[in-house]
Amino acid sequence: MSLKIYLLRHGETTYSQRGAYCGVVDAELTPEGMKMAQCFAEAYRSIPWTDVYVSPMKRAIATAQPLCDALGLTMQIRDGLREISYGDWEDQELETVRQTYDKDYLSWQTDPAWNPPTGGETAIQVAARALPIITEIESKYKSGNVLVVSHKATIRIILCSLLGIDVGRYRDRINAPAASVSIIKFVTYGPMLEVLGDRSYMPEHLRSRAGT
């Protein structure tokens, strides 16, 4: 049996609905976001979970909570799994950022690996704090199923790093809708992507919500 890491993005928040930047803002799940978390717990409770690693942010903890409650699992909270910091862009919508921080926004769009949102983090910085968590899991478990509950940018950066994709292209190459699951299997020659951004476990009325 190989090690599998399930990367689960948190459920819907008001920020995903608004299309506003939400990194260090500690947003709550919407009622629909909570339903997404419940759907995940119902769909995935039969898997023999080995461990659960979770970002310290409220939206991630709330997404992991239904599964942990149902199965008596203890969350391993890791700060390295928190969302990217958007700095001065936090709580602002896209058009406002484009107009107010036009030069920084263009630089970030061109190469977010090295160019941060104004006062925020680069993708390289996120990778430097998130990947040690993956290494910790690999070192601790040679087989089993480990759930990692994190955030849109952080998950995409982790996936790019594991799959040999330039992290500067994380916004162009990988998608991670709200409450989507991506699965990485660790095999002889390294990480292999088995599932990307799956939300088939939830009903259509949740999958089709705008901004998710």
Image (cartoon, grey):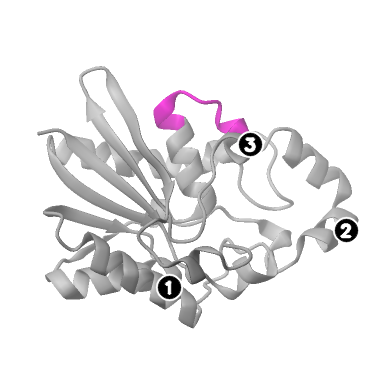
Q: Quadrant of residue 22?
A: bottom right
Q: Percent x, y for residue 165?
A: 51, 26
| 209 sits left or right of 46 in the view | right
Task: Residue under label 2, please give it.
Answer: 100
- Per the rendered image, the range of residues in magenta is 161-169
Crowding at mark 2 (Cα within 10 Å: few <14, some 14-19, many 20+) = few
The question of residue 167 being in magenta is answered with yes
The crowding category of the residue bearing disc 3, from other C-alpha atoms within 10 Å (few below 14, some 14 to 19, many at least 20), is few
Mark 1 → mark 2, Cα distance in angstroms: 29 Å
Instruction: Name the residue tied to disc 1.
Output: 58
User: Which mark, by number, is residue 172?
Assistant: 3
> Which is closer to the viewer, label 3 or label 2?
3
Q: Is residue 42 magenta?
A: no
Residue at image position (58%, 34%) is 173
- Identify the secondary structure beneath mark 3: helix
User: Which residue occupies 74% across, 51% down?
Assistant: 118
The amino acid type, in three-letter code, at marker 1 is Lys
Residue 36's place in the image compared with 188, above or below, is below
Q: Is residue 136 above or below residue 191?
A: below
